[in-house]
Image (tube, rainbow, N blue to C red):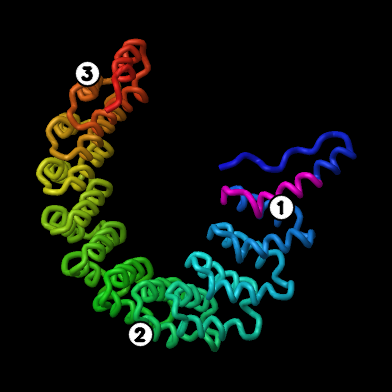
């Protein structure tokens, strides 16, 4: 990120005026010509903030909103136009145009949001948003329009039936996911929302929609009859790992007092076919039930026996985080550093040893041994990094000189 591109003015008044003019000129040039998009973006923000009454500044910001090669500059320029110059002729038309024609989806979404924020009460805008929500070819425009309409729920152009139709009929899973999230956020008090979300959680064809519905139900309808049963079913029976993972997380956070929750998490940690789900279950068990009998032993077992490296890695991290005082933890992490067949697990093991057992003399000896003899270059480099960061002494500095003098491989 570049440094400040606006310097402090000198003390002399005449020099201050000249410096001011030079600063404005420099900012204008940077906003248009600098090769670094972060400089152009910063220049646009400075110009809009400090020189909004300058006609040339307005023209520069308007041009950047359309022509800049970087989408973040166009997005920021569009935001500043809508915020500072929304009453100028042509700005509304420009924002509407960018929502449809910009090549980047982030800019198109931003244009929809700016339109709703600054011209939402203008005649014609709600109808335009409704038309985009129903008919725009671009899924990002449709989803952003639905979000903005939902903020204005209850108006003639945004009824529950309209949003329900989008949830049921839109062909794109991303749009349906956004609709489900909007239903949970803005339509919670509407009687038809709960059964619609329940239907989406159970039967939508795309996992991302089902996952979003599970999350909205857990957050908004925690005490509703059958919510808990539905989420338990999703945690076990849904065909996609992301839905099972989301359901497990919601169960652990929303119903930790239920004995069935702990048992379900144990079972998923041991038996789920997907490593991500086993990892989520393991993390929630370690985080919320660290004192429960059997949980520590289960995490120890997963650190060695799970078939996937990501779960073993997660187990090592949770052991170090939640049970650092247990002798078995230190023993297990040392074992994983020396014996695991995956370098990601061994890297995490050396990091956890260096962070948690820095004062243990055996830790230093082991990390030095790994730095010297480990065959895997990534594990070796991790050990060297921990020596550099974790132990400051003359002896370590001398030891590290061995590596600085070695030729690069």
Q: Secondary structure at mark 1?
A: helix
Residue interval drawn in magenta = 21-37
Q: Which residue is mark 2?
A: 169
Residue shown at 81% from the left, 47% from the top = 21
Viewer-closest of 6 and 300? 6
CA separation in Å, label 3 and label 2: 63 Å
User: Magenta segment: does it hold 400?
Assistant: no
Q: Which residue is mark 3?
A: 365
Q: Which residue is mark 1?
A: 28
Q: Secondary structure at mark 2?
A: helix
Q: x, y (%) of residue 356?
A: 29, 29
Q: Image check: 162 left or right of 283?
A: right
Residue 327 is at least partly visible in this image:
no
Q: x, y (%) of residue 382?
A: 28, 31
Q: x, y (%) of residue 289?
A: 23, 48
Main secondary structure type of the part rendered in magenta: helix
Q: Image check: 398 left or right of 36?
A: left
User: Decide: marks 3, 2 in contact (CB < 8 A)?
Assistant: no
Q: Earlier in the sequence, mark 3 or mark 2?
A: 2
Q: On screen, 86 above or below 44?
A: below
Q: x, y (%) of residue 362?
A: 21, 19
Q: Residues within 10 Å of mark 3 (few under 14, many from 20)?
A: few
Check residue 353 in the rendering and tell me which mark sits there, or answer none. Answer: none
Viewer-closest of 76 and 394? 76
Q: Residues within 10 Å of mark 1 (few under 14, many from 20)?
A: many
Residue shown at 54% from the left, 89% from the top = 156
């Amino acid at each position: 990120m570049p440094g400040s591109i606006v310097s402090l003015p000198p003390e002399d008044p005449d020099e201050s005026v000249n410096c001011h003019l030079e600063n404005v000129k420099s900012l204008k040039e940077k906003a248009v010509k600098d090769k670094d998009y972060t400089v152009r973006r910063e220049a646009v923000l400075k110009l809009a903030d400090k020189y909004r009454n300058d006609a040339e500044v307005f023209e520069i910001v308007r041009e950047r909103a359309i022509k800049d090669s970087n989408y973040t500059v166009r997005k920021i320029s569009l935001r500043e136009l809508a915020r500072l110059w929304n009453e100028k002729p042509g700005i509304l038309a420009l924002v509407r145009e960018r929502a449809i024609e910009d090549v980047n989806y982030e800019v198109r979404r931003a244009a929809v949001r700016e339109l709703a924020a600054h011209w939402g009460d203008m005649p014609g805008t709600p109808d335009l948003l409704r038309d985009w929500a129903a008919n725009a070819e671009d899924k990002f425009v449709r989803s952003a329009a639905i979000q903005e309409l939902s903020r204005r729920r209850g108006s003639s152009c945004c009824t529950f039936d309209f949003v329900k139709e989008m949830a049921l009929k839109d062909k794109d899973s991303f749009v349906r996911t956004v609709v489900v999230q909007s239903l949970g956020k803005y339509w919670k008090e509407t009687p038809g929302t709960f059964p619609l979300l329940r239907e989406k959680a159970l039967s939508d064809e795309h996992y991302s929609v089902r996952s979003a519905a599970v999350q909205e139900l857990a957050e908004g309808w925690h005490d509703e009859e059958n919510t808990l049963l539905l989420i338990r079913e999703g945690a076990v029976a849904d065909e996609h790992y992301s839905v099972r993972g989301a359901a497990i997380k919601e169960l652990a956070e929303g119903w930790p007092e239920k004995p069935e929750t702990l048992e379900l998490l144990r079972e998923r940690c041991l038996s789920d076919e997907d490593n991500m789900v086993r990892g989520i279950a393991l993390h929630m068990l370690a985080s919320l039930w660290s004192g429960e009998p059997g949980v520590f032993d289960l995490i120890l077992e997963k650190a060695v026996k799970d078939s996937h490296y990501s779960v073993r890695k997660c187990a090592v991290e949770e052991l170090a985080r939640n049970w650092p005082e247990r002798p078995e933890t230190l023993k297990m992490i040392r074992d994983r550093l020396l014996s695991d067949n995956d370098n990601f697990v061994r890297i995490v093991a050396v990091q956890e040893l260096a962070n948690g057992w820095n004062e243990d003399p055996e830790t230093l000896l082991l990390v030095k041994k790994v730095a010297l003899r480990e065959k895997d270059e990534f594990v070796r480099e991790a050990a060297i990094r921990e020596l550099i960061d974790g132990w400051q002494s003359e002896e370590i500095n001398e030891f590290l000189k061995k590596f600085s003098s070695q030729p690069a491989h």
